Image: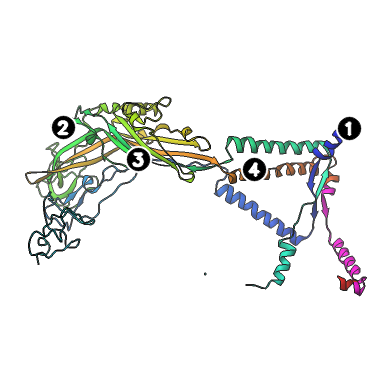
Amino acid sequence: MGWMTRWMTEHLFSYETEKLVQVPTLKIGIVHRSIQLLIICYTVIFVIIIEKRYQGTTDAQGVSSTKLKGVAYLRGLNHPDYHKVWDVADYVYPANLESSVTVITNAVITPLQTPSFCPADPEVGPLCDCPERECKSQCVPNRAEPTGNGVRTGNCVPSAADPEVKCKMGWMTRWMTEHLFSYETEKLVQVPTLKIGIVHRSIQLLIICYTVIFVIIIEKGYQGTTDAQGVSSTKLKGVAYLRGLNHPDYHKVWDVADYVYPANLESSVAVITNAVITPLQTPSFCPADPEVGPLCDCPERECKSQCVPNRAEPTGNGVRTGNCVPSAADPEVKVCEIEGWCPVEIDTLPTKGVLIDEAVNFTLFIRSTMEFKKYGFMKRNILDPETIRNCHYSSTDNVYCPIFRIGDMLERAGVKFEDIAKYGGILGIFLTWDCNLDYSWDDCHPKYSFKRLDDPESGGHNFRYANFYRQNGTQYRDLIKAYGIRFDIIVEGTGRKFDIIVLVNSIASGLALLVIASIVCDFLIIYVVDNRHFYKNQKISVVSEEIEEQSSTSYGTLESSKTPHESAGK
């Protein structure tokens, strides 16, 4: 083992370190330490403290719902007979948008439209000049204008609006040759000490193992990644019989057209599970809700001092008329009279249970398409549409049958149907695609998970909408305050595929960490080991100004001792 031990001591477990030249010049030292201080301050203050690089990050996933309050009196409406007092059911449309709300602030109303025949808008055209009513040459029948309002009949009729973005190269080339394209390399000092050598190689081995095992293998540092981009649509099935409805004459059997509102939300669907209906409202005058106020105590009907005319309560149901009238709920209590949709809204749930308890057995069908655009990979959560007619989702047997029973989804989210159905809530359906695209297309499968997104203590999820109609020329509406479960479908995931650039970056990061071994061993040989003063003198050379002057003098003497011929040859 003689040569082997000597080789290991002198080469394998020896330690090479950079030789340092110490220049005790105050000005250069101040510049050096100032730059180091700036870099340290930048790292500590900006990178670590301000940018919080000591913390891991994750994206927020949130959900929100909105509720507007307010009553408005319309001034300058183009249709004088249209109702003037608008509440939330009038100026919010659609009533149940996901994470947004639209408030109507201006409008043009075209009332009393009916399917019929009428002159086209002359600003849209086409114009015609046929002397006869029938004019198929200019008004080609069954042709629609892209910006028009209907299909041509072939007749020419009077308009309803009007019946009639080089250099010196000498010094630059020299500078580039001497500085820019010159090569500086480190001078190494070999320290053939077995203990330091073992420490040095052990740290290097640990860093290499960390890079290979954790960074490259476990964290898949050889693969590039991209986020999934997906879109989804839903379809609900089920019929329910309403029990305990506050309006006995309202229809009791509800299908998907009744309990899904609005009918076409983007990547979500809302199912009504409880409701309060205020039927047969019409624009009129009626007592305000005493719980909203204001109350009044005037002996006369006219009471403008307490019921200031044309003023609306932000949470009320109409605009004050200036009169003080008995309350509809309790004639002994007087309230201000309002102009608005009358009678005022009923805002109390009629039963302790749930109006649509059959909703627990409704089924939700989710159709989704996902794409990893960076790698040109696309897949649906349905393989064969013919196989999903009579199936239900199973994470083991039927992963490509995206038909879920509402009760099963709530159970997997840890939510009881009775707890969420009465006052409503928001349930997130997470459709996750985590795929290794180095494998086959068939190895990429969707995974479903469920979670309640809203806080149960926040009051649930409810909204108002109205059904408008006319009877005998009088405008009516049925106002519905609906409580329900909103299902938000969230498509997420990560696609991974081999990328040589990512692999090179991972290896380079690991190689950069090898400097830690040199830092630790330099500290040991300079400050810890017994021969630290000897190693320090070997590693660090101190340059003094006297030595520099002697070197300059010697260099000048050597130059002056040369013959003219030597100087010319130089």
Judge depth for marks 1 and 3 and give the one in front: 1
Q: Amino acid at mark 2?
A: His
User: Which residue corresponds to mark 1?
Assistant: 2
Q: Amino acid at mark 1?
A: Gly
Report whether 459 appears left or right of 36. left
The answer to whether one can see residue 13 in this image is no
* Contact between labelled residues 3 and 4, with CB atoms less than 8 Å apart: no
User: Which residue corresponds to mark 4?
Assistant: 507
Q: Earlier in the sequence, mark 1 or mark 3?
A: 1
Judge depth for marks 4 and 3 and give the one in front: 4
Residue 197, image x and y in percent? 79, 38
Query: How dense is the environment of label 3, judged by Cα within 10 Å: few (below 14), some, or many (20 and up)?
Result: some
The answer to whether one can see residue 91 in this image is yes
Determine the CA span between mark 4 and mark 3. 41 Å
Relative vertical location of residue 234 with respect to residue 417 in this rendering, above or below: below
Q: Earlier in the sequence, mark 4 or mark 3?
A: 3
Residue at point 21%, 30% (across, down)? 350
Judge depth for marks 1 and 2 and give the one in front: 1
Residue 211, image x and y in percent? 64, 38
User: Which residue corresponds to mark 3?
Assistant: 267
Residue at point 81%, 51% (across, down)? 540
Which image quarter holds the C terminus? bottom right
Q: Earlier in the sequence, mark 1 or mark 2?
A: 1
Residue 274, image x and y in percent? 25, 32
